[in-house]
């Protein structure tokens, strides 16, 4: 491509050729509203991304647009090794919907060289999707066999138990589900990890006014760990 705008025009053309009006209409009816939504499936978006070289300037330009597929492509085309911390924080604060949070966490943030420090800050950030992104980054790290140590592990455990085990903590549904996902994958890594998670939920149950909800969580986690052991 001759320049950035030419490449963006090429991407628009690729998206138009892959667009799905039924999907975009369905998303809009569910309250997921963008200035433009082509309704392109994630596998097709990944195929489009493979035809373009990772480029920080391109990713930044795509992210700025209120276009669903542009934002997803930005997470796929942004070079993780040179992505500035301040820009990563800004992206988190600009995430519009859970789908974009999931792509940011899986495609980009979980690969950042400073991902542990980033999550340590985001878990206390009150932006709508900051905590959800944090748990999703941890889940993706655990899925790839990575570990947390020292203060990072302590924060993961404390915030997971608060989010899942304390109904009065104020976590929304997305936070709770992402935290539970991270706990499950962490617990699958080893028997000691599984015991750490289950013991933590047991402790939460001791202080809960109604432990029925936590008993369900405990049973779900226990089944998960036994299945994958």
Image (spheres, rainbow, N blue to C red):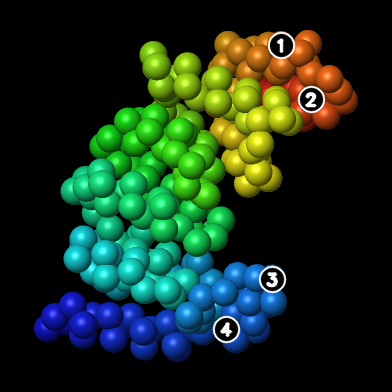
- The reply to whether dot 1 and dot 3 touch (C-beta < 8 Å) is no
Image quadrant where one finds the C terminus: top right
- Give the number of the disc on residue 30: 3
User: How much space separates mark 4 and mark 2, taking CA atoms?
Assistant: 41 Å
Q: Earlier in the sequence, mark 1 or mark 3?
A: 3
> Badge 2: how crowded within 10 Å, few (<14), some, or many (20+)?
many
Q: Residue at x 35, y 30 (%)?
A: 116
Camera-near label (1 vs 4) is: 1
Question: Can the viewer see residue 174?
Answer: yes
* Circle 4 residue: 20
How dense is the environment of label 1, judged by Cα within 10 Å: few (below 14), some, or many (20 and up)? few
State if disc 4 and disc 3 touch (CB < 8 Å): no
x, y percentage for residue 21? 60, 86
Are the residues at dot 2 and dot 1 in contact (C-beta closer than 8 Å)? no
User: Dot 1 corresponds to which residue?
Assistant: 203
Dot placed on the residue nearer the N-terminal end, 3 or 2: 3
Residue 91 left/right relative to 42: left
Compared to residue 46, the image places residue 156 above or below, namely above
Q: Does dot 2 land on a helix, a strand or a loop?
A: helix
Give x and y (percent) for residue 150. Answer: 39, 14
Q: Position of residue 135 (x, y in %)?
A: 52, 37
Mark closer to the chain start, 3 or 4: 4
Q: Are marks 3 and 2 in contact (CB under 8 Å)?
A: no
Q: Mark 4 packing: few (<14 Cα in 10 Å), some, or many (20+)? A: some
Mark 2 vs 1, N-terminal side: 1
> Could you classify mark 3 by the number of other residues whose Cα lies within 10 Å: few (under 14), some (14-19), or many (20 or more)?
few
Residue carrying label 2: 214
Report the residue at 27% width, 80% height from top.
8
Label 1, label 3: how many angstroms apart (C-alpha)?
38 Å
Above/below status of 102 relative to 177: below
Residue 70, image quadrant: bottom left
**Marks 2/1: CA–CA distance:** 10 Å
């Amino acid at each position: 491509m001759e320049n950035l705008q030419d490449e963006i025009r090429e991407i628009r053309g690729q998206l138009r050729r892959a667009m799905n009006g039924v999907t975009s209409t369905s998303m809009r009816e569910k309250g997921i509203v963008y200035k433009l939504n082509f309704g392109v499936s994630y596998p097709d978006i990944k195929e489009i991304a493979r035809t373009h070289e990772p480029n920080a300037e391109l990713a930044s330009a795509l992210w700025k647009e209120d276009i669903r597929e542009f934002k997803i492509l930005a997470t796929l085309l942004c070079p993780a090794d040179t992505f500035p911390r301040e820009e990563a924080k800004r992206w988190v604060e600009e995430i519009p919907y859970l789908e974009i949070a999931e792509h940011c966490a899986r495609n980009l943030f979980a690969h950042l060289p400073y991902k542990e420090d980033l999550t340590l800050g985001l878990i206390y950030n009150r932006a709508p999707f900051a905590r959800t992104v944090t748990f999703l980054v941890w889940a993706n790290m655990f899925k790839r066999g990575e570990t947390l140590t020292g203060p990072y592990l302590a924060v993961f455990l404390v915030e997971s138990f608060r989010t899942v085990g304390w109904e009065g903590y104020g976590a929304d549904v997305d936070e709770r589900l992402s935290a539970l996902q991270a706990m499950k994958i962490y617990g699958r890594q080893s028997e000691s990890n599984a015991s750490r998670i289950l013991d933590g939920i047991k402790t939460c149950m001791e202080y809960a006014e109604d432990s029925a909800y936590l008993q369900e969580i405990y049973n779900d986690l226990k089944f998960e760990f036994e299945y994958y052991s």
